[in-house]
Amino acid sequence: QIHFVLLVSRQGKVRLTKWYSPYTQKERSKVIRELSGVILNRGPKLCNFVEWRGYKVVYKRYASLYFCMCIDAEDNELEVLEIIHHYVEILDRYFGSVCELDLIFNFHKAYYILDELLIAGEIQESSKKTVARIISAQDQMVEAAKEEAGSISYIIAQAS
Amino acid sequence: MEQLKTIGRELAMGSQGGFGQSKEFLDLVKSIGEARSKAEEDRIVLSEIDILKRKLLEPDIPKRKMKEYIIRLVYIEMLGHDASFGYIHAVKMTHDDNLLLKRTGYLAVTLFLNEDHDLIILIVNTIQKDLRSDNYLVVCAALNAICRLINEETIPAVLPQVVDLLNHHKEAVRKKAIMALHRFHRKSPSSVSHLISNFRKRLCDNDPGVMGATLCPLFDLITEDVASYKDLVSSFVSILKQVTERRLPKSYDYHQMPAPFIQIKLLKIMALLGSGDKSASEIMYMVLGDLFKKCDSSTNIGNAILYECIRSISCIIPSPKLLEAAADAISKFLKSDSHNLKYMGIDGLGRLIKISPDIAEQHQLAVIDCLEDPDDTLKRKTFELLYKMTKSSNVEVIVDRMIDYMISINDNHYKTEIASRCVELAEQFAPSNQWFIQIMNKVFEHAGDLVNIKVAHNLMRLIAEGFGEDDDDADSKLRLSAVESYLQIMSEPKLPSLFLQVISWVLGEYGTADGKYSASYISGKLCDVADAYSSDETVKGYAVSALMKIYAFEIASGRKVDVLPECQSLIEELLASHSTDLQQRAYELQALLALDARAVESILPLDASCEDIEFDKDLSFLNGYIQQAIESGAQPYISERERSGMLETTDYHSQDHHEVPSHALRFEAYERPKPSSLRTQASTELVPLPEPSYYSEAHQPISTSSVSERESSEIKLRLDGVKQKWGRPSYQSSTSASSTPPQAANGTSSHPDVGVGSSSLKPRSSYESKKPEIYPEKQRLAASLFGGSSSSRSDRKSSSGGHKPAKGTASKPPKENPIPVQPPPDLLDFGEPTATSVTATDPFKELEGLMDSSSQDGGSTDVMGVLYSDAAPVTTTTSVDSLLSELSDSSKGNPGTYQSQTSKGPNSQEALEKDALVRQMGVNPTSQNPTLFKDLLG
């Protein structure tokens, strides 16, 4: 079971947090401080896992952003590493070559996508297509004007 | 053309939905992004909080504006600040009819509130309404919220509706309903115990996503009660078989592995079901064996499945063939250059070693490399392995290593763990008493504040009782050596309190026993302790008691006692102490000094700490006194049983009091199954209950104490395994107790091969060229750890190398290329699925009989079969997929190869658009941090 998901930039700035187990605001800050201290200082060739307070934290760096997930000691680390990657791939598909800036300004969208992937710390859907489908169904509820603009920009993009 | 592009960018700004926020919000994000320190960031957030507080008070805020405020609140909270002033607005937003706003509301509340927040009651109502919505997206949003927000009390309010949703026509809803039920089961198993059949039913849902989600609750249920799910063994096996045969839709593929996350979940379940069950295990042999062949060990996900297979095999009763396959997989992991895989290999070794103890031997050098690796994670994992393979012949080396490591780290959590492991191993395998005391001293000295107090008590008892043999001479030698070592250590500054307690106790009890040290010498030392650690009352108490014993022994043996002046002043100081405990000890000591030898001897006899004190529970010696009292007219004693008649009422009362918070009231409120009246009841009944606070109060002390208990019970469990593992006489006889002094620090620093950069190359070459390059230290260490001589090892190596010579030669030439050169094309046969889909029997039909409601689903099983087999042949790998799969290749180090020329076109354009957009908004962090624009996957 995943206890929390953490996105931290290389400078230690928090980009996204999702807590599946109860932590008070104070504990959260402490966890983030502690973990970013540990993870950001690790060398590039080392394991993507850190043992921490009896749990394990699996992390992976994408460009300047670290994706971290905290799991139980008995969980499969490689699997969680792939769950992270799975999430990044879905983000990538959704935003179109996702970058850190996308997540900074659209963190709520990143949350929506995460909610379709994980529920209560368990992976609920492993098909990228299914996640994409439901997210786009949700997005269609958003203003129609946006769609229009999107199609025009597509035409222009084709032209240029 | 240029113009067109600019227009495009401008339009793109509108199309990027998320960027559609106001300037204010973008400015906030921007300024936070540019903040140079945490303090600056905090200042910005605090002023933002002020702004939002003011804005939220304004009347008639337009909904769109409100939505943005709430997203800003989420942002604040995410940065670690308190946004509770705005929670109520998020709750209100969930009531909105507009899905977009509702979803924002739900998102915010799931991030803000935890399940026992007071505001939850205001949401339950909305959730109930939304679960009935026609729009499945609304239902999904509500179910998402349920998974986060519903607690034991509110489960009954939504349970019936969630159960209904299990049959919803949209698979997304069914899946979330399953997850919600799973959540309920976690929160309060009794609330859903009558619904467990639903999980079985959903296991054969048409939609693989729903089936996959069902595995989560089933895993939990099976963990709790294996026996009642044995009937599902063949179903799980057949599902796994179908998955590996690519009969799930292609969209579940991940890096060309068919539905790997489902496979892993299934393997976990099979491990539970096959544990200790020969017949169940046998059913699994086939599919597990196939998995070893099919898993592509060049991708990370393939290795994840391989690792899960190893775990399953270590749990079930495996066949020799499977064991061999698992051992092969482990050796591949260990030989890999990737630290991740080495880590998994060490972990797998630790699991498999329980079953076949000699498997570690052929990997001894790899293990030692990992032990000396600069990567802390890997090192710790290796210590865990060593801990599992400790026996009396290698305990000294292993514990010494552990202690060296323990001293070198600062992480208290792990320090505690490794200290308790040292203690445990020392207690179990100690070759000599002296060694044991030495080790304990080291543990106490360096981690004394972290070890369980029981360990200290054990040590004291051990010194007092000796080691079981009736050899008084040896015992007194042991005590003397303990006293000597303590007198030496005492001069060190800043010792942990617990250690000082042990020292004081031992010195008091045995300091003068041997006659080697005079009473005044020992008592002087004890006074020093009390003086140096004057703020620690426990230590002081121990020291005073020790002084009392020293003087008592002196008096009893008829010598004259000279109380040292510093001791005298200590006593005087303590007589006026604020601590009643210390005061009493001081008074006792003072009183004792005035007594004669005979009296003192009976108060504190020599070396009597272990004598059983006889209790006269009936207090028979008081009989005469009682008789006298009764005769002079006192009331006779009424025994407890007789009195209990009177006490019964109060008993009841207190019992009631206990039960109220746990059950009685809550169920009353919800048991009436009328949905209409239920809501009002829920809100009225729940508000006034002060339960949560009571609950936490009552349970806090228990939970803290249980931590240590759990620890110790864990220790016990592991012990059994250790004994079993190494108990084989044949193995132990061959081991020579060649305890090489472990040159931990020296060894690592003197040899360049363990340096960061070269560590990846070195071990490999040492494997291939075997002997000549192995450093003698390493060899010796290996010998002392693994007990085997080097010649027997090389024998083993050559024999194991016999059946895979091709591998050795293949991996030699491309030393620089980290990708193992073994792409087995026949394993990833894409033609296979088409062939298998033609097979007449549908394994899913086997499931039919198992499910009580299969008649209802009768059609669907067929549909599913068709569905899966229809999807299966579509295995033409798109170029995108194959590119992505390369990406996950962990051994490549950087995930950089993804963006090949073909896919770069549109991406760079999008990046341009983003760049333009951001510039237009005045957010220009490029100069600060250009990496913000870097594609995460590129």
Image (cartoon, coloured by chain):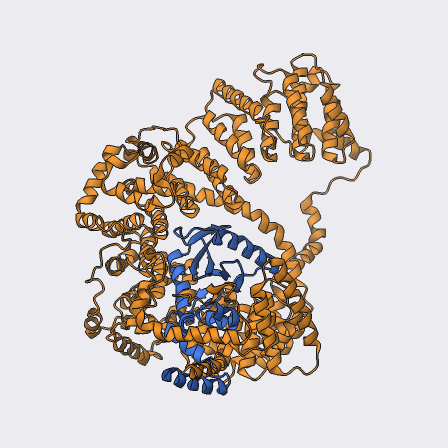
Chain colours: A blue, B orange
Q: Is residue B793 above or below residue B522?
A: below
Residue B23 visible in this rendered orientation of the protein: yes
Q: Position of residue B177 (x, y in %)?
A: 46, 74
Task: Say which residue appears at 20% left-offset and 73% top-offset.
Answer: B834
Q: Quadrant of the N terminus of chain B?
A: bottom left
Q: Is residue A79 above or below residue B480?
A: below
Q: Position of residue B614 (x, y in %)?
A: 61, 29
Q: Quadrant of the C terminus of chain B?
A: bottom left
Q: Is residue B595 above or below residue B243?
A: above
Label tally: 0
Q: Nearer the viewer, residue B765 or B288?
A: B765
Residue B188 visible in this rendered orientation of the protein: no
Task: Say which residue appears at 63% left-offset and 61% top-offset.
Answer: B42
- Residue at the front extreme? B2
Q: Nearer the viewer, residue B728 or B782?
A: B782
Q: Is residue B403 left or right of residue B553?
A: left
Q: Nearer the viewer, residue A4 or A47?
A: A47
- Residue at the right extreme? B632
Q: Quadrant of residue A25?
A: bottom right
Q: Position of residue B603 (x, y in %)?
A: 67, 23
Q: Position of residue B467 (x, y in %)?
A: 47, 26
